[in-house]
Amino acid sequence: MPGTLGRMNDWPQGWSDDNRGTPRYGRGSAGAQPEGARVMRQVRRGPAAPPGQGGYGGQVPPQPSYVDGGEGQDDRRGGYDSGYNTGQVYGAGRRGGGGASDGGDPGAGLPPSGPRPDWRRRIKWTAITIAGVLVVTTVGTYFWADSKLRREVDLSTVIDRPSSGEGTNYLIVGSDSREGLSKEDRKKLHTGSAEGKRTDSMMILHVGGNGDTLISLPRDSDVEIPSYKGSESGKTFKGTGRHVKLNAAYAEDGPTLLVRTVEFNTGLHIDHYVEIGFAGFANIVDAVGGVEITIDKAFKDKYSGADFQAGKQTLNGEQALAFVRTRHAFAASDLERTKNQQKFLAALAHQVATPSTVLNPFAFYPTVGAGLDSLIVDKDMSLWDLGSMFFAMKGVNSGDGTSMNMPISGSSGGNLLWDKAKVKQLVNELKNDQKVTVKG
């Protein structure tokens, strides 16, 4: 018995008599109640041995897994089994989180909440995406617009042309073409039912480095028809010194004879030709929602359908066409009409170029479509050339250029005679791209 008692006293170090009789909870806690779940360990044991194998069959039994936290959490939360087999039972988890034993941050073992958004990267890719969309839209719009241009006038067939000068000269023509107009449209727009085409307005626009110049050519101008090559027959017709009104040249053989006649009577080389008919003009005005203009004096004209009061007002397509065509309401009929045409075209260019039209696709595409569908241009005309012409007209309206009539010295038999000395000086200034000093 004494030996037995001696052996019974060989308890492990740190155990007291109280330890023998009363079970304790936690890690040596002296309290009567278990420690809170916050510091409890959950032990996960391996699967039980199959029946009949007797224990673990001589193998090392699977080690328990100590996990912090409640049910359903595993060692990914920094459990205490991470270093069990190396003797680090109470060490930190795999993520390096420290407990009270190493003075670390108690929350260091928790998984990160996720990476912070990289705003610089997001902004970069957003900018790249927007730029890509703009490029695709711009390229698509260019080819769409380019496909609508009616390049029907071949200026290479014009013979005996004067030499080119500095800058670019456009011959802009408004014709009385009824193409695309129904009987109801013709009645509404007061265009009449005449067949063929005649010119209601003609202008030369010079685009250069010393200011742009817009020159109206009265349709009643007295000009000589020179030798020319027929646009359809290809046959050359010799000039006989015959004098006619300028619009008769267009009626006789179309755009190429008109260009030939203007070049012969002025000595100025025409680089590009642009023509628009009644329908196209009215459609463009309606597409931009009308054009605001100030009319100085009230007038009526039963032939064009004009009926205007004085003052600022917005004209729709029908009213605009009546305004630029009216000639019977004025004493100096053709000269007054050319002034109205210049005034309105400049206002139209200004209206089209406003942000409310250019930046609004619901206004921009209908406007461009209406204009390009009805424009007839020469075969060498590009969209760049057309844009240059348009913005030059807008510049003239803003005061950056000169707007004038061809200088007139008098009339003969109803035809307006050009002042030859002034015309020569004007053409010389344009050819040398000098600032225009001649007054119309």
Image (cartoon, rainbow, N blue to C red):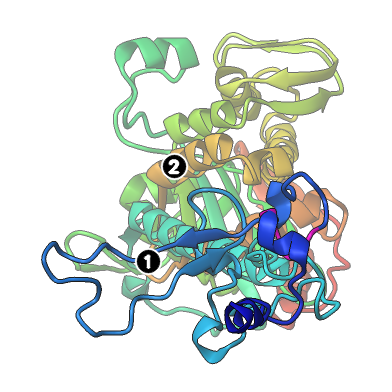
State whether residue 385 appears in this view: no
- Which amino acid is tagged 1? Gly
Tell me which corner region of the image, top left, top right, bottom left or bottom right, holds residue 226.
Answer: bottom left
| Number of marks present in the image shown | 2
Residue 202's place in the image compared with 402, above or below, is: above
Taking the spot 49% from the left edge, 29% from the top edge, the residue there is: 283
- Which residue is most to the bottom? 86
Which image quarter: residue 94?
bottom right
Residue designated by label 1: 239
Does 129 sit above or below residue 327?
A: below
Q: Main secondary structure of the magenta part?
A: loop
| 115 vs 175: above or below | below
Find residue 391 and report its horizontal and vertical position in percent. Answer: 68, 58
Tag 1 or tag 2, which sits nearer the N-term? 1
Give yes or no for residue 28 being in the magenta stretch.
yes
Q: Nearer the viewer, residue 285 or 22?
A: 22
Residue 346 appears left or right of 202:
right
Quadrant of the snapshot with the N terminus: bottom right
Q: Could you say where residue 238 lies in the image, as x and y percent from the top left?
A: 31, 69
Q: Secondary structure at mark 1?
A: loop
Query: Circles 2 and 1: CB distance less than 8 Å?
Result: no
Residue type indicated by callout 2: Gly
Which segment is the magenta one?
22-29
360 shown above or below 164:
above
Compare residues 88 and 26 and report the one nearer the observer. 26
Q: Residues within 10 Å of mark 1 (few under 14, many from 20)?
A: few
- Mark 2, residue position: 369
State the residue at coordinates (58%, 88%).
Answer: 87
Q: Judging from the image, what secondary structure is the residue with disc 2 in?
A: helix
